[in-house]
Amino acid sequence: MRKTCLNTVYQQALKDERIIFIGSDLGTGTLDEFKHEMPDRFVMEGVSEAHIVGMATGMAMDGKVVYVNTIATFLTRRCFEQLVNDVCLHNASVRLIGNGGGLVYAPLGPTHLAVDDIAILRSIPNMTILAPCDADEMERLIPQTVDWPGPIYIRLAKGGDPIVSSNSLTCKIGNAIQLETGEDVLLITTGITLQIAVEASNELKQKGVNASILHMHTIKPLDKKTLKQQLSKAKVVMTIEEHFMIGGLGSAVSEFIVENSSYSKLHFCRIGVPDVFPHQYGRQEDLMRVYGITAENIVAKVSELLDKKRDFL
Amino acid sequence: MSYRTELVPLDDRSKQLRRSILRMMKSADRGHLGAAFSLVEIMRVLYDNILNYRADQPDWLERDRCILSKGHGCLALYAILADKKFFPDMELDKFCEFDGILGGHPDSRKIPGVEACTGALGHGLSIGIGMAFSARMDNSARHIYVITGDGEINEGSIWEGAMSASKHKLDNLTVLIDYNKLQSYGSTHEVLDLEPLADKWMSFGFAVEEVDGHDVNKLKGLLAKKPFSRSQPFVIICHTVKGRGIPFAESNPHWHHQSRIGQKGFQQLYNSLDTS
């Protein structure tokens, strides 16, 4: 997904002279083609995220479209004030590409995990937040980021994630995508959790439970129109995210639900990372399993919610 | 701090701009007097003699950029922008008012002529570096000026930016440091010593000059040369006096910011300025 993202930025830059790429001490050889073909628009800065984000803002204030890339957590936690006062207050066309969104950097420990990136950025006015589910969806979204007004955060997952998105469904920034239609449960996903929801949905089908899947590659602005349509049909709703349950997709959806009294009979559950610092290493999947971000846990939780619903009736 | 200056008397223009600052402060009964008064000659020389701009077309692409990174010195910026007719003079009487455009820190979304929203310290240099990079990309002669405070350069982001400006050989960037040697709590020497300041910037790859920041002719002379040094960003350490022009406020940390000054207090300020 990362490679596709950066290559798509490179392809756009070939066509659009406003585009500048800034990396923060990225891996050697990153975007070599960009560097050699458009040296004036390729910048590799040092480990200085606060400065880089300010510099990108200055460029964008002059009409440039600036893609900044580094590890997600440094791009969100480290330079929060620059994101607020520089990028977002000036509504600058800066695109923040965050490597290793979620639990990707499990072996590197809690300093490198990005499970609060969405919570941090959702709190800033003008910010658009994208978390594509796979490389194909990334390729469909990046060209739209060039002229999208204001700042954007693009959350990257690990490379080589299975492709679950489909070319046949319209993919537009700000619009949720409905993948499956079932009347028993609504699964709402963002980023790579779509894969897990698809797997869970297949397992549920075998148990005679039909799920709808609503994939939100854009978490902000939240597609309230589609969400409203889907919620009005649902009795059991679950959000699934590779992020803290505080402040991310689950929070956004639950805020929407409580603000709309017509959903008071909904049975709702969030799957995500609880309010703790992860203290194991291992692989991304290992931590996902610890926090129940798995098809198996979704199936179990859906069954629980369906039981509750029956008791309630 | 080897640099020594003898205070030259303020001329009519310097006093007139300071009177505009007092006028704004009076309307809100508050403001960063010390921080603004130390800046007046720097702002005046830039807007009177150096910057290329069109007050009736503040977004003109080829204008030079002047970023007041020490946003709390905004009263000095507002005084000169009003003088140059970027916005109506009457705005000066609505400082910090609910429906005014002039707030306690400058807002580029509202005020014609203000390049960036500043106030949180340590942001303006990196923004200016981005603009200098962009000007070079466009083969434009636009020059970028960033004015920082002295306490402001305690911020690490300033030094991240300094390394970057030097790496990119941005000779279209000039940083002016308002070195009045007094930050909010007390002297910069006690709070966080900046010395040897010129050596620091030199070692970061800048061409460095020091000047009496209230000496209009010397400032003009230094700023007229663009680029000051080919392939190097330029920093001018402006030795200034906080509160310059009001003897009882000069180098007095209590006048960094003041509120509830009252009618009598303002009369004393005006009198002191007129007789200084």
Image (cartoon, rainbow, N blue to C red):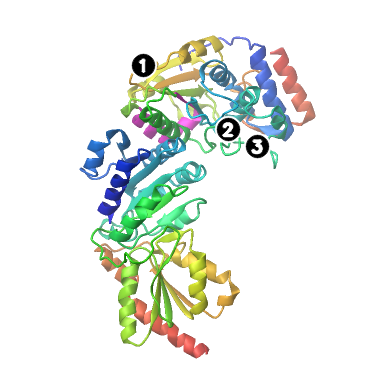
Label 2 Cα neighbours within 10 Å, binned few <14 / some 14-19 / many ≥20: many
- The part of the chain drawn in magenta is B143-165
Look at label 2 and name its amino acid.
His
Instruction: State yes or no: discs 3 and 1 in contact (Cβ < 8 Å).
Output: no
**Residue topped by disc 2:** B72
In whole angstroms, how far apart are the C-alphas of marks 3 and 2?
Answer: 15 Å
Chain that bears disc 1 = B
Q: Nearer the viewer, residue B115 or B1?
A: B115
Q: Do pointers 3 and 1 mark residues of a single chain?
A: yes
Queried whether the magenta region covers residue B204, the answer comes back as no
**Residue topped by disc 1:** B229
Residue A137 at least partly seen: yes
Q: Position of residue B265 (x, y in %)?
A: 75, 27
Question: What's the mark number on residue B101?
Answer: 3
Q: Earlier in the sequence, mark 3 or mark 1?
A: 3
Label 3 Cα neighbours within 10 Å, binned few <14 / some 14-19 / many ≥20: many
Q: Earlier in the sequence, mark 3 or mark 2?
A: 2
Look at label 3 and name its amino acid.
Ile
